[in-house]
Amino acid sequence: MQLIARRFDNGQLVRITIESRWIKQINPVECTKVNMQENGFGQEKQTGHRHPPTADAVSTRKLAAADSWPWVAPGLVDLQVNGYGGQEFSSPDLTVEKVLGIALAMDRFGLVRFCPTITTNSREVTEHALQTIAQACQVPEAAQRIAGIHLEGPYISAQDGARGAHPAAHCRPPNWQEFQQFQKAAKGRIRILTLSPEYPESQEFIRQASATGLVVAIGHTAATPEQIHQAAEAGARMSTHLGNGCHPVLPRHRNYLWAQLADDRLTAGLIADGFHLPPDVLKCLIRAKGPQRCVLVSDLSGMAGLPPGRYRTNLCELEILPSGKMVIAGQQELLAGATLPVGEGVVNAMRYAGLDLSEAIRLATEAPCRILGIEPHRLVPGSPADLVLFDLELEEKQNTQDVQNGQMKNSPSRPQENTKTTPPLLQFHVRATILGGQRVFGNFS
Ligand SMILES: [Zn+2]
């Protein structure tokens, strides 16, 4: 298989030759005209060397009109996916077929690896979900896509605000014996555990869990700044969706947000969907941690992909508002998960935090691989052919194209914004996903 696209990291137009599961060659395309038929896009196009676009290029619309070649990057990795299309992983109804269905649905978002995320629930439901995902991983299609399970809870704060949409009745202090049962049910596939360091048991638990190679993440917490630093000392390496799953009001200085921002041992998971973190907050978090200590996550809800309305889940009753914002039903502020894929976070990191494409892509490729302890895929010969081909499209262009094609958009609807005062919305539009050298999503051949 061969494809032609612009490298995400330097804008160079290249021809990538894929053989079996690997990138065999990457050669610059020097000629000024390349037949688009070779790439399956059906038209001829002038080419030239370009650099990764910046937020400025995004906001001045240079980008979308500039070139119709797709960008190419290593496939995206998402550490936090709760389900999709009406099915949560944390559910007594979960089946192997449903796990496989969700795993395959992630192809459309340019993901090549993801972590099914099991949120706080009863011991029975948690064990059922873990067992079912472990069983699904015996199917090659699921095993290829699932990088490990993210267990978010149940060892989190039971306080309102901190626990977010997690049911208070099941939030509890860490219990090493119970966790070992969970890991057994998961056949050792739990890779990330989100917990709160606020309990007396937490420090020792974090030490034990980290010693097994587990990634301990701090989240849904009411911990003191001291407890945050002690958790990092004990081995915690990450903050789960920093800035979300928090109390609505905090002491202005001595709080767990500053402590996590200040502690360089913690990489910050960020939901950059435009709802969970206001643009100013996203910018400040990325600037404070530095892009090298940030990782984008979608926190995609099991309700993602469904139309606006009220839905009863195992966690709570939630509501998808017409804007795409998903909240706990009956109010407009307390969020209950996300509906936009991690690629949208890439463009928001550019738009709001001033990263260029190369830096922003790394937040959804290298950064999550580093957390998981897996070799990041690179655009070099010999690397696995796990790639995403994508466009950065202005939303209005995207809408027109969708109508023309008569197709659904990849992403659910976005909030309406006043384009006179804010840069135009950009979408991360996946053209194709290549996994293990095979095209698993997209329309090029
Ligand atoms: Zn959460």
Image (cartoon, rainbow, N blue to C red):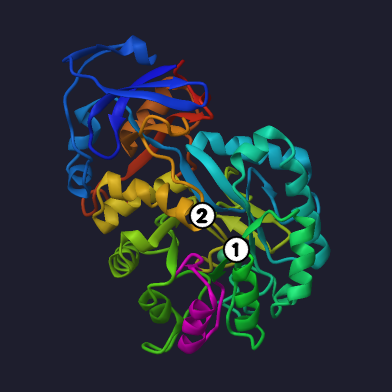
Magenta-colored span: 219-242
Please name the residue shown 39% across and 56% down the image. Answer: 274
Residue at mark 1: 213
Spot occupied by residue 370 in the image (x, y as percentages of width and height): 45, 55
Identity of the amino acid at label 2?
Gly
Please tell me in which quarter of the rendered image ligand 1 is found.
bottom right
User: What crowding class fits label 2: few (fewer than 14 Cα within 10 Å), some (14-19), or many (20 or more)?
Assistant: few
Classify mark 2: helix, strand or loop: loop
Q: Is residue 230 magenta?
A: yes
Image marks 2 and 1: residues in contact by CB distance under 8 Å: yes
> Residue 3: where, in percent of width, then height?
37, 20
Question: Which disc number belongs to residue 373?
Answer: 2
What mark, if any, has residue 114 been given in the picture? none
Q: Count the numbered circles shown.
A: 2
Is 50 situated above or below 30?
Answer: below
Residue at the outermost right position: 124
Beta carbon at label 2 within 8 Å of ligand 1? no
Residues packed near mark 1 inside 10 Å, few (<14), some (14 to 19) or many (20 plus): few
Q: Earlier in the sequence, mark 2 or mark 1?
A: 1
Quadrant assignment, res 382:
top left
Q: What residue type is disc 1 on? A: Gly
Residue at 66% x, 39% y is 143
The answer to whether one can see residue 62 in this image is yes
Image quarter (top left, top right, bottom left or bottom right) of the N terminus: top left
Res. 42 in view: no
Marks 2 and 1, how far apart in space?
9 Å
Residue under the image location 59 percent in, 47 percent down = 147
Q: Compared with residue 377, is residue 319 higher up or lower down, i.e. above or below? A: below
